[in-house]
Amino acid sequence: MLRFIARRLVSMLFVLFSISVLSFLIFFATPGVDPAARIAGRNADQATLRAVRKDFGLDKPLPVRYGLMMKKLFISRDLTSYVNRGAKVIPQVTEAAPVTLSLVFGAAAIWVIASIAMGMLAGVFRGRPIDTIVMVVGLVGISMPVFWLGEVVNLLTQSRLHHTALFSWVPPLGYTPFTRSPFGWFKSLVFPWITLSILYIGIYARVLRSAIVEAQEEDYVRTARAKGLTERRVLFRHALRTSLIGFVSLFGLDFGALVGGGALLTEVVFGLHGVGKLTFDSLQNLDLPVILTTVIYAAFFVVAANAVVDLLYAWLDPRVRRA
Amino acid sequence: MSGVTASEVPAQAGHLAAVAAGPWQLARRRLLRNRVALVMAGVLVVVVALCLCAPLYAHYVAHTDAFASNLDGKTLVNGKLVPVMKNSTSGLGLGVTPVGPTWDLHHYFLGADQQGRDVAARLLYGGRNSLLIGTAAALITCLLATFVGIVAGFFGGIVDGILARLLDVLWAFPVYLLAISLSTVLIARGVSFGPFHLESGSLLLPITIIGVVYIPYVGRPIRGEVLSMRRREFVEAAIGLGATNWRLLWSDILPNVVTTVIVLFPLMLAIDMLTEAALSFLSIGVQPPQASWGTIILDGQDLLYTRPTVALAPGIAIAVTVLALNVLGDGVRDALDPRAKLRRTD
């Protein structure tokens, strides 16, 4: 296990390094355009352009520039926006991070619990209506753009059905910090959580369902039944446990897609000022230093999260450690 | 062979002919038996046909220009002439509200957007771009991924080492973040590679970006398949017969990879269309005055509570198209190669 951890950490460092190089190349070395003009934003004057060139060492060779950028991002942490003159970027990101994390973890909790319940029901009652429902929900879930689903939810809860008793408690769009009011925090996030999790509930339930169906054919499940264990014990202690392995590794992959894409779009639609909304706002005026920071921070976070999931996976299933 | 009498041979041959339909024929039969997949294929054909008819609809039915703003125009609603943009009567009387859906095919069927343009006509034009970008991006992904996957898996060694690492890094980079970075950098001023220049408003930009970011999704499974195929007997047999590398690639490896690509194509197309919508919604995909389903949802965001149809209609169009693609894709997979997986879904 120790060797596996070491190997996984080394490969994580390699991927982090490659991702930082890749994003550096995208932002600073795409052919055809002067990076200074891009970083300085639209309608920048000569003085700003000169400042950008000096700040990012644009007259120096590429490796030096890469070093400068990494220093600005992770060591001196003094990257400033050129669109909103002098605004430091990294405090903005760290302020926004709790919003994104609240959104992502809440949604993940909902979809994991709901999909385990649905997947088990569908696996046990194979071919019954619940099975079809899970199938349809899964397909519809991955077919809707999340930002559009969010708008539909807003339309219902904020406008069309807001006067009814069902949705009158829904607060206006926006985020309430947990420290200010835990209940307000919960209320402001319920619908963003539901919106985001609808995308994943069905697909995860389908994954679990087929794993459980497969597990039911396995010898160890037959043995457990032959021993005279109750059906509930067979299902929870034997079939479910191994079926969760695939589920966990899929979770690692989707977590990345979520932080990078799903959460970003959900934040925009629900007016939650998280990292995604920050990225969106800076996209509107092409505030490159902010976009650069959010992309690299989010990518690093995702890679680290994936490594953690892999370690969990190896802990659950010793066969993985030898792969 | 001497034990086989003359009368037995034709009978046996006839029996074999009935059973031994080719793999493509078998797949086609299986797909044709799948009712749901067929219905969805029909839905797709209808969507594509409607979108292709966009100019016809705009010119001959709705009589509008879907790309020119029409703030002072008037239109017929229930036989009465009303302004397309109605001045607000509440509050300070500032701001205007575009006309809502009239459900009359000739006059603003789905209403107008904030520039007084016909949403129904824009929906059809936008659909063309969404479908075009999705299809072209999926083609790019599949072609490049097949190439990279085959080269890496077949030649092994250093080539494989480099390509596989590259695929791993792209795979670890969250797709949307990668697409956002590329689009942000390229969308404002375009890009030039030697003699090629992509203008900033060109549809080729989102096509290339979306096509490239998904390469690992298809490239990794193909590489794995080729790796294991190289050790199979039929490849060894071909090597034993003195086949050249080129011949091995062309007549032994490629035909066996094609099914995987065909299976993954509709699912890729579905993902690509969703990605295009998201990028356009973030204003870094299709650029105005061009439209796509994503940009129309963005247009409709400000009108969500007053004129929800503007945002609802393109979303429904995306959901229906992508759902049809996903179901059809599942059908194709079940018919051709039940083990192929894009996401590890089931």
Image (cartoon, helix red, strand yellow):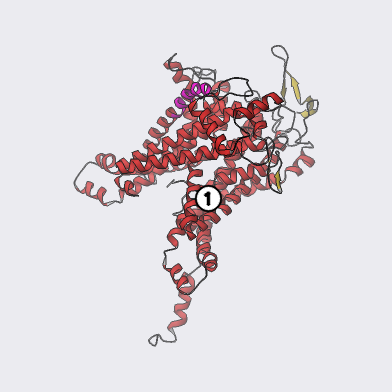
Image quarter where the N terminus of chain A lies is top left
**Which residue lies most toward the front here?**
A60
**Which kind of residue does numbered mark 1 sit on?**
Gly
The foreground one among B204 and B48 is: B204
Residue B286 place in picture, x, y as percent: 67, 38
Residue B157 place in picture, x, y as percent: 46, 57
Q: Which residue is mark 1?
A: B329
| Chain containing mark 1 | B
SS majority, magenta: helix
- State the image quarter where residue A233 is shown: top left
The foreground one among A5 and A71 is: A71
**Which residue lies most toward the left here?**
A227
Write the residue at 65% across / 38% down.
Answer: B186
- Give left or right: position of A241 versus A181: left
Residue range (magenta): A90-104
Disc 1 on helix, strand or loop?
helix
- Residue B345 belongs to magenta span: no
Residue A108 position (above or below residue B34): above
Residue B100 position (above or below residue B211): above
Residue B303 place in picture, x, y as percent: 65, 25
- Give left or right: position of B258 versus A307: right
Residue B78 place in picture, x, y as percent: 75, 28
Q: Is residue A137 in view? A: no
- Residue A93 belongs to magenta span: yes
Q: Please tell me how crowded label 1 is: few (under 14), some (14-19), or many (20+) other residues with Cα within 10 Å.
A: many
Residue A183 position (above or below residue B66): above
Write the residue at 67% across / 44% down.
Answer: B204
Q: Is residue B106 in view? A: yes
